[in-house]
Image (cartoon, rainbow, N blue to C red):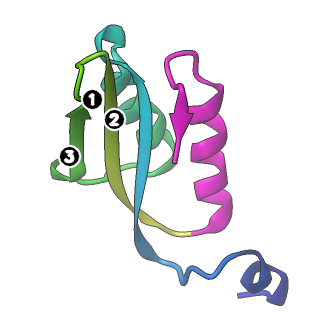
């Protein structure tokens, strides 16, 4: 790993990494998140997807755990998630 890459992140790749996105519950957010993550982390385990509604049921959080291979890969996922109209925030 190049020195500049080590300075940018404390993560050691490859590693298991959770990605969470939140949006309105009725919006189809889960499908959108799965499509985006699949483009950047093909073959991730479907068993690593979880959804959790907010207490009032208006919002939903979708979490996908992937095997991350690089910071640019994670950056690309977050960039696409945050640009998507159904995603209110990504963490």
Horizontal and vertical percent position of residue 11? 56, 79
Q: Assess whether mark 2 and mark 1 are in contact (beta carbons under 8 angstroms).
A: yes
Of residue 56 and residue 6, the one placed in the foreground of this image is: 56
From this viewpoint, which residue is outermost toward the right? 4
SS at circle 2: strand
Disc 1 vs disc 3: which is toward the camera?
A: 1
Q: Earlier in the sequence, mark 2 or mark 3?
A: 3
The residue that label 2 is drawn on is 61
Residue 71 sits above or below residue 65 on the image: below
SS at circle 1: loop
Report the side of 9 relative to 84 (left or right): right
State yes or no: residue 29 in magenta.
Answer: no
Of residue 58 and residue 13, the one placed in the foreground of this image is: 58
Residue 53 sits above or below residue 65 on the image: above
Distance from Cα at disc 2 to Cα at disc 3: 16 Å
Horizontal and vertical percent position of residue 64? 33, 48
Residue 89 sits above or below residue 15 on the image: above
Distance from Cα at disc 1 to Cα at disc 3: 22 Å
The residue that label 3 is drawn on is 46
Q: Residue at x 60, y 68 (%)?
A: 70
Of residue 59 and residue 16, the one placed in the foreground of this image is: 59
Q: Residue at x 27, y 29 (%)?
A: 54
């Amino acid at each position: 790993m190049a020195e500049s890459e080590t300075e940018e992140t404390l993560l050691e790749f490859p590693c298991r990494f959770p990605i969470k996105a939140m949006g309105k519950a009725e919006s189809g957010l889960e499908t959108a998140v799965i499509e985006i993550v699949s483009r950047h982390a093909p073959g991730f385990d479907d068993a690593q997807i979880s959804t959790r509604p907010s207490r009032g049921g208006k919002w939903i959080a979708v979490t996908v755990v992937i095997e991350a291979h690089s910071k640019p890969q994670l950056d690309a996922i977050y960039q696409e998630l945050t640009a998507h109209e159904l995603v209110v925030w990504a963490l």
